Image (cartoon, rainbow, N blue to C red):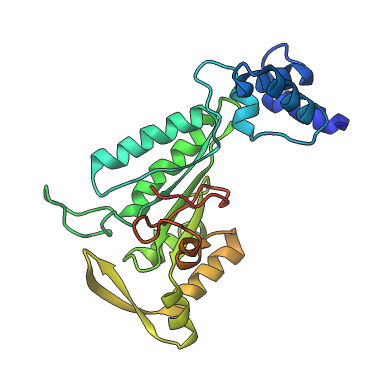
């Protein structure tokens, strides 16, 4: 059922030393069935015929020690060095085990704002650069580059710098997305200004259409940033407003709460 190209891809990306395609499917079906012989055979038959295939980490890691079967994660990141570097460590572990991860950096204070210990913040984009480098260095599951999505809310003080990052040659290993609300789009249509916020206080007013133009120009030239529609995502969130979804994994198909 598989073409020669598909078999070559399967072996190059997912096989461990000495594994044939059949051996890959037997390893995976055995691990997923958890000693249910009937289910194991059903899974194997579905995979060998190409009817069903699990995600990449599952194909690569199922049945292996410390194998991670999930591909998609969103992790929290708060406005502290401890939180930032804990998130970086967790990201590296997820990459090591074959997954991808998304972060919303909007909790980080803007560039130039004072720190509690003295001095000024370098801003979320500067910390994103560390995550970007980490993505290049740590191979996901030991066989491919990691995947990360970095998001920032449309009303963050550093939104313009974020939208320009790839235009300046930064954050080239990451997917970038701006989280926008319906109110932002209404302000664009009505040619009105939006408030850029920090610490629940208005810090600056900018034309909403200018932000959208910057996003569109960046996407046209570099492919980023994309847009995450906060209200639309949470419309299908059964636990809203108790739990608010404000980010997604790198491929965008799994919006997730921290």
Q: Is residue 125 left or right of residue 201?
A: right
Q: Is residue 49 above or below residue 113?
A: above
Give the residue furthest to the bottom: 190
Residue visible at 64% across and 35% down?
55
**Left or right of residue 231, residue 39 in this image:** right
Tell me the residue at 34%/63% (across/down).
158
| Residue at the extreme top | 18
**Is 43 placed above or below 255 here?**
above
Q: Nearer the viewer, residue 139 or 256?
A: 256
Q: Residue at x 28, y 41 (%)?
A: 83
Between residues 102 and 161, which one lies in front from this camera angle? 102
Number of marks in the rendered image: 0
Residue at the image point whose x is 40% and y is 60% from the top: 240
Q: Quadrant of residue 224?
A: bottom right
Residue 169 spot, x, y in % from top left: 50, 53
Q: Position of residue 212 (x, y in %)?
A: 49, 74
**Closer to the camera, 137 or 97?**
97
Q: Is residue 24 visible?
A: no
Does residue 91 sit above or below 38 in this rendering? below
Is residue 12 at least partly visible in the picture? yes
Residue 87 lies in what quarter of the image?
Answer: top left
Is 123 left, or right, of 256 in this rendering? left
Q: x%, y% of residue 59?
A: 65, 27
Is 254 placed above or below 6 here? below
Q: Quadrant of the N terminus?
A: top right
Q: Quadrant location of residue 187?
A: bottom left
Residue 210 place in picture, x, y as percent = 45, 78
């Amino acid at each position: 059922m598989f073409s020669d190209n598909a078999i070559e891809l399967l072996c190059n990306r997912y096989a461990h030393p000495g594994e044939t395609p059949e051996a890959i499917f037997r390893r995976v079906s055995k691990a997923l069935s958890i000693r249910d012989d009937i289910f194991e055979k059903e899974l194997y038959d579905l995979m060998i015929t190409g009817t069903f295939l699990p995600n990449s980490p599952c194909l690569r890691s199922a049945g292996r020690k410390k194998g991670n079967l999930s591909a998609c994660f969103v992790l929290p990141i708060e406005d502290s060095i401890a939180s930032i570097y804990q998130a970086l460590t967790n990201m590296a572990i997820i990459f090591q085990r074959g997954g991808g991860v998304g972060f919303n950096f909007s909790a980080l204070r803007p560039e130039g704002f004072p720190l509690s210990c003295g001095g000024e913040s370098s801003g979320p984009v500067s910390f994103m650069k560390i995550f970007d480098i980490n993505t290049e260095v740590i191979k996901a599951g030991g066989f491919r580059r990691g995947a990360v999505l970095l998001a920032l809310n449309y009303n963050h003080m550093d939104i313009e710098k974020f939208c320009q990052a790839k235009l300046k040659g930064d954050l080239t290993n990451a997917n970038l997305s701006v989280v926008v609300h319906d109110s932002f789009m209404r302000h664009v249509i009505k040619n009105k200004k939006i408030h850029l916020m920090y610490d629940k206080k208005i810090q600056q007013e900018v034309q909403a259409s200018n932000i959208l133009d910057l996003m569109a120009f960046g996407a046209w030239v570099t492919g980023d940033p994309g847009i995450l529609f906060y209200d639309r995502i949470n419309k299908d969130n059964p636990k809203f407003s108790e739990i608010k979804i404000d980010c997604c994994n790198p491929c965008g198909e799994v919006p997730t709460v921290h």
